[in-house]
């Protein structure tokens, strides 16, 4: 018998209409013309006093084929707590376009935009995953703007140093030209993508079961220089082969993450420890083979750790994140809706997990498709699932995590505080995303400073 979703359509509609003004200090909605498959906060652009302006990236999946899919650069003004007017949360509609969102630039992307990550060392350099075996790297500052002239907000011109960045090509429907193409995958690589916080390195996983790592160190100067992005008469994109090819998975790689630049968690009786030695050589990956693998490319045998059947026999592990506040803390999400928290100092078997959660398991669409640690609260993380919900988890409400790992039967199980989300997007079914982008004041202010 089919299980009921967490929220019925009517219940979710009532939630939006009746509870949004009560729950949120501020609520903003921007309706896109097409579904979006990915969104990403960028760096802080400007502090405007009562609000902060952040850079953000959105994608559009152009279903009618009228033009290529797009990668959109936007500026989003996020109000600081307790300064927005009450009308901001009481008068929104499904088709509204908030004035706090300004579209800065549009790129015609070759293929779907499945995932976006920026290089922390050079935030103007963006890497995208698509529905092919290649990854694309874009210098968003020098890429020509592909928005049609006279299209209102979407057609407003942008400039760099007083020079127009509008595209000048023979065909208005040609995809934009990337600044660099990363090659090496033998089959499509749609979602697993990570950038190191310490060095200009990019990692990717694909259906070919491979984890690949590219070093952009020798290319940064040319990527940041003038010209490129389809300009300067260039008709082709240079390619970069992967420096490391890591083999250890036996099925499609679901997600990966570099060791972050972090501060090890202090004990209650001691002063905070020094920052950990974050490394662009160390990363974690998960896959449909159920494995959680630790890699160190400095080692003669890069696979330095492996948890077999991390979420149980036959369960695909879909996502992973490594805390930037405590570099011993790792969280993984799986196909069966389960979430496991790990201490990487003791991570060799499934029984080594230190906490387990399963709030997403009461729906047929329970696959966990994303997990992410809070950027400023050490024991808090979020999970998103195919059941159209996002859950927030506070580990301080479970067993004390600094103690020894509890016995398997004593693992804490808890329900997170879930809020309704948009249309689901995942790897098991072709993602269609949601055609709207929404945010709240305090949560967005915190999230915009995260990874």
Image: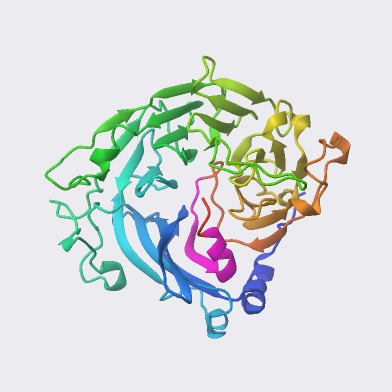
The magenta segment is 430-447
Confirm whether residue 314 shows in the render. Answer: no
Confirm whether residue 353 shows in the render. Answer: yes
Query: Is 274 on the left-hand or right-hand side of 201?
Result: right
Q: Residue furthest front?
A: 271
Q: State the residue at coordinates (72%, 29%).
A: 346
**The one of 279 and 306 positioned closer to us in this rendering:** 279
Q: State the residue at coordinates (71%, 25%).
A: 348
Residue 287: name its quadrant: top right
Please give the count of numbered marks on the rendered protein: 0
Q: Residue furthest top?
A: 300
Tell me the colour scheme of the image: rainbow
Tell me where residue 272 appears, x and y as whole percent.
Answer: 66, 46
**The one of 434 and 287 positioned closer to us in this rendering:** 287
Against 186, residue 74 (above or below) is: below
Query: Is 272 on the left-hand or right-hand side of 135?
Result: right
Against 337, residue 94 (above or below) is: below
Tell me where residue 51 appears, x and y as whole percent.
Answer: 47, 73
**The one of 47 and 20 positioned closer to us in this rendering:** 47
Residue 301: name its quadrant: top right
**The one of 120 and 150 positioned closer to us in this rendering:** 120
Against 211, residue 324 (above or below) is: below
Tell me where residue 176 appears, x and y as whole percent.
Answer: 25, 48
Magenta residue check for 445: yes
Magenta residue check for 427: no
Tell me where residue 189 appears, x and y as whole percent.
Answer: 44, 35
Q: State the residue at coordinates (46%, 52%).
A: 38
Against 27, residue 274 (above or below) is: above
């Amino acid at each position: 018998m089919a299980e009921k979703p967490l929220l019925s359509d009517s219940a979710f509609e009532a939630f939006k209409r009746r509870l949004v003004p009560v729950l949120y200090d501020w609520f903003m909605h921007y309706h896109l013309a097409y579904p979006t498959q990915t969104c990403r906060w960028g760096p802080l652009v400007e502090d405007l006093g009562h609000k902060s302006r952040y850079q953000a990236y959105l994608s559009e999946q152009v279903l009618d084929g009228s033009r290529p899919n797009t990668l959109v650069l936007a500026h989003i003004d996020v109000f600081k707590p307790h300064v927005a007017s009450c009308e901001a949360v009481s008068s929104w509609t499904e088709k509204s376009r908030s004035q706090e969102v300004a579209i800065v630039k549009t790129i015609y992307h070759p293929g779907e935009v499945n995932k976006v990550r920026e290089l922390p060392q050079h935030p103007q350099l963006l890497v995208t995953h698509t529905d092919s075996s290649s990854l694309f790297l874009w210098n968003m500052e020098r890429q020509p703007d592909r928005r049609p002239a006279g299209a209102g907000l979407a057609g407003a011109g942008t400039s760099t140093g007083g020079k127009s960045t509008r595209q000048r090509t023979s065909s208005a429907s040609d995809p934009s030209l990337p600044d660099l193409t990363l090659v090496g995958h033998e089959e499509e690589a749609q979602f697993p993508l990570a950038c190191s916080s310490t060095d200009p390195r990019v990692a990717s996983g694909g259906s070919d079961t491979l984890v690949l790592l590219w070093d952009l160190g020798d290319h940064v100067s040319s990527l940041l220089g003038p010209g490129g992005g389809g300009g300067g008469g260039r008709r082709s994109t240079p390619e970069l082969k992967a420096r490391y090819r890591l083999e250890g998975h036996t099925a499609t790689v679901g997600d990966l993450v570099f060791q972050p630049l972090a501060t090890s968690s202090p004990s209650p009786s001691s002063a905070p420890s020094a920052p950990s030695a974050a490394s662009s050589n160390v990363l974690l990956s998960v896959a449909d083979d159920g494995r959680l693998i630790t890699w160190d490319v400095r080692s003669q045998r890069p696979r330095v750790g492996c948890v077999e059947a991390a979420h149980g026999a036959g369960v695909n592990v879909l996502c992973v994140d490594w805390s930037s506040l405590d570099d011993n803390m790792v969280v993984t999400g799986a196909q069966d809706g389960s979430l496991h928290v790990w201490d990487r100092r003791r991570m060799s078997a499934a029984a080594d997990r230190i906490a387990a959660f399963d709030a997403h398991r009461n729906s047929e669409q329970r696959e966990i498709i994303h997990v992410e640690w809070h950027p400023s609260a050490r024991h808090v993380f979020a999970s998103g699932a195919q059941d159209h919900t996002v859950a927030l988890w506070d580990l301080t409400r479970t067993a004390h995590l600094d103690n020894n790992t509890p016995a398997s039967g004593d693992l804490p199980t808890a329900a997170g505080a879930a809020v309704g989300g948009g249309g689901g997007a995942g790897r098991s079914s072709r993602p269609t995303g949601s055609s709207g982008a929404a945010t709240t004041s305090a949560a967005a202010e915190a999230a915009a400073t995260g990874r």
